[in-house]
Amino acid sequence: MRKQTVLKQKAPNPLTGHGNTKQAINVLKSFVKNFLIWSLSSLFVWRVSPYLGKLHCTYTDSCGGGWIDTTPLVGLFFGYFFFTAFFTTVIGGNFKYIWLLVWILGPLILLNFFYGDQGLLRAVAVTTICGWFLGWGILKMKQSLKRKKV
Amino acid sequence: MNIKTSYIIVILVAIIATALSLFVVADESLIGSTPINTATRGFPFHFVEHPELPLLLVPYESIKFLPALFSINFSFWLLVSASVYQVIFLDPGRKRTLLPTAVFLGFVFTGISMGRGSCEQGFPIVFNSICGDNDALSFFYRFGGPIIDLAYWCLMGAVTVSFFVWVTHSRLPVLKYILIPIFLTSGSFIYDKPCDGWFCISGRGFPLPYYDDEFSWIVYLVDILLWVVIYIVGKNVFRYLKKKMGKSTA
């Protein structure tokens, strides 16, 4: 009975009352941390995109052709999805997977890939999963090392 | 934090935002009666007009203040700051998904604002031109433009999310079953899948394309009905899965 009343007091009224300030600060903190990770990883990818593009073009022959050098663009494209998934998984704060969805799906819609090339969409999915998987492996390793130390 | 403090914070933020919008200088006034050699300031409407000089050199008498537009601007920023406050501090049910949803909508709105069909891409700041005259844009517009545009549309995303929260918790919660499908139908305008396969109706819109050079009200209404069904079914499936997952973890 007592527990129920405590819960009732804590429940926020979304229009007139107030949520838990601590929770709101947690949400804000998670936003700031994940946003910083996203910004820094985007900046990192922007800087290394020519090299990533070259790396990609070395193993595939999909970069040849026109008079514009698309190598950095290819690097930027694949690097963004790979490193955003990787960094967010390894060092992301609370609700990192929700934010990861936002960072991946948001730009995808922004770039209108939803009605673009289906192959490109598949490439994005594979790149993101690879980034997440690598990050997840490192995270698990980090956690097991921590446990061993304790 | 009590209710009075939150009101004070929201009003203060709105005042600061309105004041900061004075840094936005436009060449043409939206009211359309600006004399030549006049700079206008304020966002979204320009509520201050003055001679085209650095603001500090303009004598007080030559500043024209437009109170009606100022009230609209202040109301706009009040709405924005209240929505952001709602999204951050009043997340109902402690789902903590309002802020990510607002940011996601920010990306979607930026995408829509980029694909307006004209040469210029981006709103409120044009940062790209698809007609080949990109050199006319300065460095600030090309690199700062996308960031400012995204921030602006994230704020609009917060307003949208906040509106739906308000509808959900208002006295007529059933409204959300109409308003959310209308929003999704309108948003599906960005879906423009190229025509291939055995069954194909070209145009913009989802599930059925309602715009193909001409807008079809009937298809639009059918889409809304389909979204109502998708929304109700999706919501119940999500609720069922959540319940099942809760049971399995308990």
Image: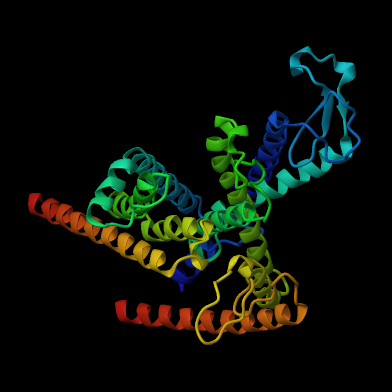
What colour scheme has been applied to the protein in the rendered image?
Answer: rainbow
Q: Nearer the viewer, residue A106 or A119?
A: A119
The extreme left residue here reads A148
Q: Nearer the viewer, residue A11 or B176?
A: B176
Q: In the picture, residue B227 is in which quadrant?
A: bottom right
Q: How many labels were placed on the picture?
A: 0
| Percent of width and height locating residue B186 | 67, 68
| Percent of width and height locating residue A136 | 23, 59
Residue at image point 35% right, 81% down: B247
| Percent of width and height locating residue A61 | 28, 57
Horizontal side, residue A118 vs residue B248: left or right: right
Residue at image point 26% right, 57% down: A60
Q: Is residue B250 visible?
A: no
Horizontal side, residue A105 vs residue B194: left or right: left
| Percent of width and height locating residue B174 | 69, 78
Q: Is residue A32 above or below residue B54?
A: below
Q: Nearer the viewer, residue B44 or A98?
A: B44
Horizontal side, residue A1 vs residue A133: left or right: right
Residue at image point 31% right, 60% down: A127
Horizontal side, residue B152 vs residue A101: left or right: right
Q: Is residue B110 visible?
A: yes
Residue at image point 75% right, 14% down: B56
Q: In the picture, residue B91 is in which quadrant?
A: bottom right
Q: Nearer the viewer, residue A110 or B23?
A: A110
Q: Is residue A50 above or below residue B199?
A: above
